[in-house]
Image (tube, rainbow, N blue to C red):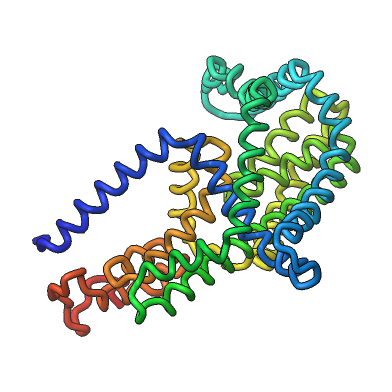
Amino acid sequence: MINRSTLRNITYWTIIIIGGGYLIYIGEFLLLPILFALLFAIFLIPITKFYKKRIKVLWLSIVFAFLTVLIPLSGVVTLFYYQLVDMIENLPSIAEQLENGISRLMGSIESINPFNFKARDVINDNLDGFAMGPIQQIGSGLIFSTEILLGIGLTFLYTYFFLYYKESFKNFIIYQFQKNNRDDIRDTLLDIKKTVQGYVTGIGLVIVILTVVNSVGLYVIGIKYAIFWGALGGILAVIPYIGSILGGLLPFLYSLPTTDTTWQPIAVLVFYIVVQQIEGNFITPNVIGNKVNINPLVAILSLIFFGTFWGIGGVILSLPLISVVRIILEQFDETKAIAMLLSADIQKNKHKFKTLLPADNVPVIIMPEDHDFGEDSK
């Protein structure tokens, strides 16, 4: 039977999730620039410190830190500019070619399946939406470019002030707690900073590596707009488990109606399967490591949750946000069990849950060690 403490905690968390979800939903325009600015500011902290040691002027150090990141980024954007302009001018044609690719793929499936199953009929009603959806998103992003520019401008402005008032904000947070807890709060803030810096730096490096590898591979195979598709595949790497699949599926479908040979679409498919395996087993583990320390189930749920409320911005922010939440929950006895439930070590530490008591130290029933109830209890 559930004790009062457990029931009370369930009630509290239900209220927090519902109330927090509602605030997240209505506060998208306010929250997104602030959250992106926090990530960007944490990423720029070491660069700012580097210039501060030499320039001695804080505001000028922040400006140089901005320039250090934005100048190379502007060069990359300029590199892609001409191909992106060509892509934008041909969006309807590309969408039509994607539709033709899907239709051709479904026809091949129909010809080899042994059952009386018409794959083309199954997706016929949704074909336009599937093919045109990503293209329409690009178009709508261009139409509402003023809103996007405003969001980017606010993000940079917030980032500057977060860096300028960093010490004041940090001291304010620390001194809200009792003296005997302040060292733990400092350690928590340091863990959050290291996690965010490691994730942002790592995912940025992964995007660059995948963009170069994808673009070179598609160019060698002979796929048009190789840089665009390569960059798209690299950017989609911010979506764990799903992004690399989407990044390979779109150029594969595009290659079906736009290439003159059969081997090219097959080469695209094989190439992305190999790249995905290398990225998942070597690149991401070595570059990012276990910085976020979130298990795959929670990662996917957080992607869906934040993506539902905030779209692509929520997808990008989901992993660092849930990682920060896990670090914070780990600092309090009442929420350590939840932090363990979110972590990547949940399976390895499954027996540690029985050592955690409820918030008011109500005794919990622990079965004797000599009782066996299946493999999980061993």
Q: Nearer the viewer, residue 88 or 19?
A: 19
Q: Nearer the viewer, residue 327 or 184?
A: 184
Side of 320 where 80 appears, left or right: right
Question: In the image, residue 94 lies at what x, y percent?
Answer: 76, 21
Q: Nearer the viewer, residue 200 or 145?
A: 145
Residue 224 shows in the view: no
Question: In the image, residue 261 lies at what x, y percent?
Answer: 87, 30
Q: Residue furthest front?
A: 57
Side of 115 where 164 appears, left or right: right
Q: Residue furthest bottom?
A: 370
Question: In the image, residue 256 lies at what x, y percent?
Answer: 77, 28
Residue located at (43% from left, 65% from top): 173
Where's the N terminus, which quadrant?
bottom left
Side of 165 where 72 appears, left or right: right
Above or below, comparing residue 186 to residue 94 in the picture: below
Residue 255 shows in the view: yes
Above or below, comparing residue 307 to residue 131 in the picture: below
Residue located at (69% from left, 52% from top): 276
Quarter of the view holding residue 47:
bottom right
Residue located at (89% from left, 36% from top): 222
Residue located at (84% from left, 41% from top): 218
Above or below, comparing residue 10 to residue 308 in the picture: below
Question: In the image, residue 220 lies at what x, y percent?
Answer: 91, 43
Q: Nearer the viewer, residue 45 or 286?
A: 45
Quarter of the view holding residue 289:
bottom right
Where's the C terminus, which quadrant?
bottom left
